[in-house]
Amino acid sequence: MAGQSRKWTILVATIWIQAFTGTNFDFSAYSSSLKSVLGISQVQLNYLAVASDLGKALAWSSGFALLHLPVPTVLLIAAIMGLAGYGAQWLVIRSFISLPYFVVFLLCLLAGNSICWFNTVSFVLCIRNFPVNRPIALALTISYNGVSAAIYHLAARSITLSSSGSVYLLLNAIAPLFASIAALPPILRQPEPRPLDQEAANRDAVVFLFLNILAIVIGIYLLSMDSLKFTSLDIYRALFAGAIIFMILPLCIPGIIYARDWAKRTIHSSFRLEGPGFNLIDNDDLDLTKELLVHEKEKGDHGDGFELEEQDGNYLFSRIRGYFGQLWSYILGVDKLAYLGDEHNVSRLVRRVDFWLYFMGYFCGGTVGLVYSNNMGQILQSVGGTSGASSIVSLYSSFSFFGRLLSAWPDYSRGWMSFARTGSLAMALVPTPIAFFILIASGSTARMVYISTALIALSSGFIFAATVSVTAELFGPNAFGVNHNILITNIPIGSLVYGSIAALIYDLNGRENDGAIVCMGAACYRTTFVWWGCLSVVGLVCNFLLFLRTKGIYNHYRRITRG
């Protein structure tokens, strides 16, 4: 029982780590100040955002570190990297020191890489301690990464009502360090993994349900507090204290559930409830290797409905379909995955059609949303909303949080609705092109920028969280670290390409003001929105094709696990 309770303290510690280390989401809150202090163009500012994202290309270093160092050591190294990267930038923006542009670029790279180290620690802790409920645990903890900017917004306002960019950089430097120190005690007392019986699995499901409900309440609290404007530091300090209390509350829920179960066994055993009213985990899912065993017996028969039948009755119909029909069948059938959880090494991964559809869906979907978030400050400034830069960052953070929470929907709905996780990935991208076309059609007014930001954040948040589970399901959990780091190399590539296009268009339409180029009006980003909207449609098509190609193996898996 002690080991079971300690795993929940580790989950809460992981929540704290994620909640205070999403420092890449508030770049727009201080980017204008950094641009002014350094006296750089929009293109050069974009390169700093690229540097932060380029740190993700070095995410393999965190996995390598975990092979040779204990988790607490890796966590503290990540905190020190963030302290150095963001702390030095804070000194620059406050004019305490002066550094050349290239050094600031390297500092952004170091700070961006620290985020990957934090994420890797969180993923490893969830996977080790919740092997059965891994997707739900990952979705829950990753979701809190989306509230970082909203929490930092309240913290910044509790320090100064102006919430200047330098305050965000200071918080980026010290908050992850304090969160890491607070998370160390439960991590140091990490229990040995133990197999779960059905009663324990059901109890875990109840705990996860209540933790998700609490997460929704926290998200609503942060979103509603952001929409209110106060003129007193004391009020903001009270609101920030309320946010911290909410972050501590998850520690209480597992204790309440375990106490309830103890009371059932010792006091009300005669009223024992036979079977829970709901179950987030299928009974046979506790033995995840069952599908692999059955696969050897039923290999080649997945019932996916997309293989071209050669029966006589269908021959004439196949001829009528013609060339395009045959091409469509080929696209859906060539080099399909055999079953979920099939382990892929790097050489096998990069030869997979499904991987490149997955890669392009992310590259033209979630990455576009991330590049948009890097440019939110300038986008809002261009339509005359300079004073709301910190608010739009908080808005993006809050809706990204809700999107990440929604990524666990396939796991909660599988008892009454069967839906492939790749299908939910395709559905999640739909709001992104809609948001860009709203911005194009509306002339990019400040109000439409806020509405579109909420849609893009919701979509991107879902994708960022869901891909963690999708990578493990499609290409194997054992090679997850390497495979997922290969996948997210699309982020720095997209940040460079998409961000550079946006910056060039911005500078072409801008005018020099005090040594910096400033652009005002809808023309600053109209062409960029057209490009981003079209790219997100391409991503939607890739995700939809991936869904059609993998729908069969998801259905096959459900038939096997339901026996």
Image (cartoon, rainbow, N blue to C red):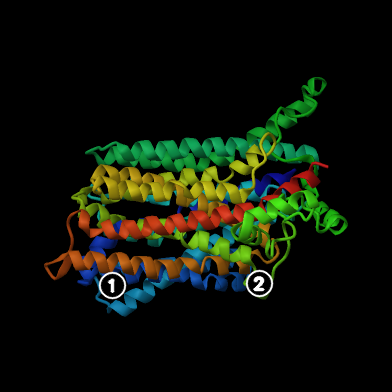
Q: How many marks?
A: 2
For label 2, the SS is helix
Q: Report the amino acid beneath label 1.
A: Gln
Q: Nearer the viewer, residue 471 or 180?
A: 471
Which residue shows up at 17% across the image and 67% down it? Answer: 517
Which residue shows up at 33% across the image and 69% down it? Answer: 500
Badge number at residue 164: none
Find residue 341 and report its horizontal and vertical position in percent: 72, 58
Residue 268 drawn above or below residue 285: above
Which residue shows up at 54% across the image and 64% down it? Answer: 359
Find residue 61 and report its horizontal and vertical position in percent: 56, 73
Q: Which residue is mark 1?
A: 44
For label 1, the SS is helix
Q: Report the amino acid beneath label 2.
A: Leu
Q: Nearer the viewer, residue 300 or 189?
A: 300
Q: Nearer the viewer, residue 34 or 158?
A: 34
Q: Quadrant of residue 230?
A: top left
Q: Quadrant of residue 191?
A: bottom right
For the N terminus, give its image quadrant.
top right
Note whether residue 397 is visible: no
What is the CA distance from the residue labelled 1 to the residue labelled 2?
37 Å
Q: Left or right: where does residue 472 sit relative to residue 102?
A: right
Between discs 1 and 2, the one toward the N terminus: 1
Q: Quadrant of residue 289?
A: bottom right
Residue 206 drawn above or below residue 500: above
Residue 537 drawn above or below residue 110: above
**Residue sticking out furthest to the right:** 297
For the C terminus, give its image quadrant.
top right
Note whether residue 475 is visible: yes
Q: Which residue is mark 2?
A: 67
Find residue 360 and report its horizontal and vertical position in percent: 51, 63
